[in-house]
Image: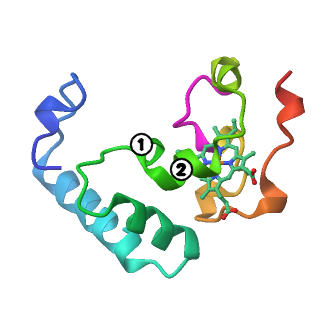
Amino acid sequence: MSDLENHFGDDASIDKESNKEILAFLVKNSAENYTMEDSWNFLNSIGDKDIIAMTQTSFWKKTHKDIPKNIFDNKKIRSKANCKACHTDIEKGLIEDENIKNLSTFN
Ligand code: HEC
């Protein structure tokens, strides 16, 4: 949030007030302040490594290792970062097994 002018090659800078608001949201909802098991798993697998994407953590890699790589090219998914394509409850902060889409629906 302190260097949004250089955000993955884009200038994502925003006004001071919005920046403050978003930063407060991110801190309040960060894995450190969450009690869900998966938050702990992500945090634990980051350790002191310099990881900027959940998909780069050993926990994510381990839990998704059996998923065929080419599924992420599917036009309904397009990216590993599109968690919502498969985890329909993720916007509620949940990752329940019964809410993971059957991957055969992407064939
Ligand atoms: C292509 C669909 C797909 C995408 C995209 C995807 N996942 Fe998953 N995810 C799965 C499937 C399927 C499993 C269950 C794997 C298993 O049990 O073998 C899973 C498992 C998980 C688990 C383990 C759940 C548990 O505790 O058992 C977590 C956490 C998770 N995903 C988070 C994420 C996050 C965060 C993202 C986005 C950064 C993401 N996933 C993107 C399909 C996906």
Position of 77 with respect to 106 (left or right) is left
Q: Residue at x 74, y 64 (%)?
A: 96
Q: Height in image: 66 above or below 26?
A: above
Q: Residue at x 78, y 61 (%)?
A: 97
Q: Height in image: 45 above or below 16?
A: below
Q: How many marks?
A: 2
Span highlighted in magenta in the image = 77-83
- What type is the residue that disc 2 sits on? Trp
Name the spot of residue 37 as percent of width and height, x first.
57, 75
82 in the magenta segment: yes
Query: In this view of the protein, which residue sits in the foreground, 40 or 91?
Result: 40
Name the residue beneath numbered marker 2. Answer: 60
Q: CA distance from mark 1 to mark 2?
A: 7 Å
Crowding near pointer 2: few (<14 within 10 Å), some, many (20+)? some
Crowding near pointer 1: few (<14 within 10 Å), some, many (20+)? few
Q: Is any part of residue 35 visible from this angle?
A: yes
**Secondary structure found at label 1:** helix
Which quadrant does the C terminus fall into?
Answer: top right
Name the residue beneath numbered marker 1. Answer: 56
Q: Is mark 1 within 8 Å of ligand 1?
A: no
**Secondary structure found at label 2:** helix
User: Do residues under tags 1 and 2 come within 8 Å of each other at their CB atoms?
Assistant: yes
Q: Is mark 2 within 8 Å of ligand 1?
A: yes
Name the spot of residue 57 as percent of width and height, x first.
43, 50
29 in the magenta segment: no
Please identify the residue farthest to the bottom as the structure is shown: 35
Name the spot of residue 80 as percent of width and height, x first.
55, 34
- What type is the residue that disc 1 sits on? Gln
Q: Is any part of residue 29 visible from this angle?
A: no
Q: Residue at x 69, y 17 (%)?
A: 75
Position of 86 with respect to 30 (left or right) is right
